[in-house]
Image (tube, helix red, strand yellow):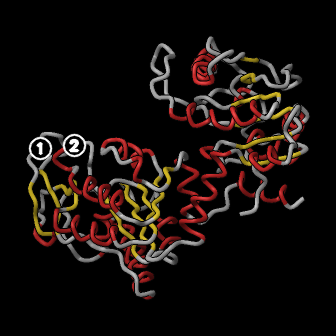
Amino acid sequence: MNVLRLADLIAQGRVAGKRVFIRADLNVPQDDSGRITEDTRIRASVPCIRMALDAGAAVMVTSHLGRPTEGAFKPEDTLAPVAARLGELLGPPYEKGVPLVANWVDGVTVAAGQVVLLENCRVNKGEKKNDEALARKMAALCDVYVNDAFGTAHRAEATTYGIAQYAPLACAGPLLAAEIDAITKALAHPKRPLLAIVAGSKVSTKLTILQALSSKVDGLIVGGGIANTFMLAAGLPIGRSLAEPDLLDQAKAVIAAMKARGAAVPIPTDVVVAKAFKADAPATVKAAADVAADDLILDIGPQTAALLAGQLKAAGTIVWNGPVGVFEFDAFAHGTETVARAIAASPAFSIAGGGDTLAAIAKYGIDKDIGYISTGGGAFLEVLEGKTLPAFEILERRAQG
């Protein structure tokens, strides 16, 4: 994918003294008192801001936070806690917080070598609908627009798309550029065999992903409630397990599409069941054919996990979205842990995304062993579906002149 990159513009001397507008993803979780409970996204945004500052740019940064009502700013919508944490991470002279600017659409005062944070962009009327007049006003604020927010790359909004249309220069920041490179490596030019893990509670939410991947991958591992539906499609009993019987034809079609290409959807040969969906419910390993009418399948069994681990360790590329069992309950976490550690031990290039996937990576402490951890949930899923993300499309178009 051919896009301009901030690093290239800096190397070409096209950023010094310029006004740079960075769309970051600073949408971090907060407790009821407004304290930030997890700051990964802020930390991830720092390299881009630091690059622009070190290059001598006048830097403006904005992000959405939560789901504010456009045109109706409320105290809980403020980026003030983000400004404070960002200042701590940037250090002097911002250790007491990055200056926060409200009502910024009609003009921003910032000097070269300095940074300001522009208040919650989704409070601006027309942001979500990518209003042209708003986008043009934002574009007029800068010489260089930088998108460094992969988490919003699947949305065509004023700060993610419209401004990129009208700004003098539009480029990708280091975080977005890394996502583009990882996605290209994993899906456009993968080292074979390419294995994908798609797990979740429902086939319906990921059917288009399963269909898209069935034409690309050498192995499609399904987990969670999705695996139960595929087991049912294969004629296996699933008891009272979560499944979608109305989607059996679609599951069979995915299995058939893979088989026609000499690829496979491994169906579990053993599972871990319980009589109730509870953390302390007794766990029992059963052959897949022996699931009782009152059983709930909550994990893959050790035989299936070992088989999948062997395939993952022999892979060339791995795409991972979702744990294969109810890993939040320790008794039903062994399958996900086995799969996670196999991915970590594999020489394959691995890319992982999705909230539950990131939670599993954190739980097993394997973040350093994953090739690339994607920062965007919805955007990552749309990439797996084969969709062209709006933010990628406009940056690519602008790069072509």
Residue drawn 79% across the image and 35% down it: 55
**Quadrant housing the C terminus:** bottom right
The secondary element bearing badge 1 is classed as loop
Pointer 2 residue: 329
Q: Mark 1 sits on what residue?
A: 281
Q: State yes or no: discs 2 and 1 in contact (Cβ < 8 Å).
A: yes
- Do we see residue 309 in this rendering? yes
| Residue 244 location (% of width, % of height) | 34, 62
- In primary-sequence order, the first of circles 2 and 1 is 1
Taking depth in this image into account, of 162 and 181 the one nearest to the observer is 181
Residue 278 as seen in the image, left or right of residue 16: left
In percent of width and height, residue 120 lies at 68, 26
Q: Quadrant of residue 290?
A: bottom left
| Quadrant of the image containing the N terminus | bottom right
Q: Is residue 354 left or right of residue 114?
A: left
Q: Amino acid at mark 2?
A: Phe
